[in-house]
Image (cartoon, helix red, strand yellow):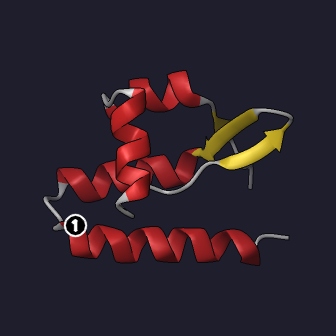
Amino acid sequence: MTHTILRLPAVKAATGLSRSTIYLRIMHGVFTRPVSLGGRAVGWPAHEVTELNAARIAGKPDGEIRELVRKLEAARKAVA
């Protein structure tokens, strides 16, 4: 399985959100935190962005999306 990392411009294009809105959603727990790529570079796993988009399209409330974010971030630790 390939693990694609999306940088901020790709995440903005995939979600239609601005940089400030993405980081505001991270602060409110409804978007996953970025992963460090080294130095000052960060990115988001592509499958997480896809799942969050699907949840928004499905009209899930913020509470369910927060739970999804917790599950996605917990799953990062399981990847070896």
In the displayed structure image, the side of residue 5 where residue 16 appears, left or right? left
In the displayed structure image, the side of residue 65 where residue 26 appears, left or right? right
Residue under the image location 38 percent in, 32 percent down: 20
- Tell me the quarter of the picture where residue 38 sits: top right
Q: Is residue 14 above or below residue 72?
A: above
**Nearer the observer, 47 or 8:** 8
In the displayed structure image, the side of residue 36 where residue 27 appears, left or right? left
Residue 9: image location, x then y, percent: 52, 21
Name the quarter where the N terminus is drawn.
bottom right
Question: Badge 1 local density, few (<14 within 10 Å), some, or many (20+)?
Answer: some
**Nearer the observer, 30 or 75:** 30
Residue 57: image location, x then y, percent: 19, 50
Residue under the image location 74 percent in, 74 percent down: 77
Give the amino acid at mark 1.
Asp
**Nearer the observer, 57 or 9:** 9
Helix, strand or loop status at disc 1: helix
Residue 27: image location, x then y, percent: 41, 56
Q: Is residue 22 above or below residue 10?
A: below
Q: Is residue 2 above or below residue 21?
A: below
| Number of numbered discs on residues | 1
In the displayed structure image, the side of residue 71 where residue 66 appears, left or right? left
Instruction: Determine which residue is flagged by label 1.
Output: 62
- Tell me the quarter of the picture where residue 80 sits: bottom right
Residue under the image location 34 percent in, 60 percent down: 28
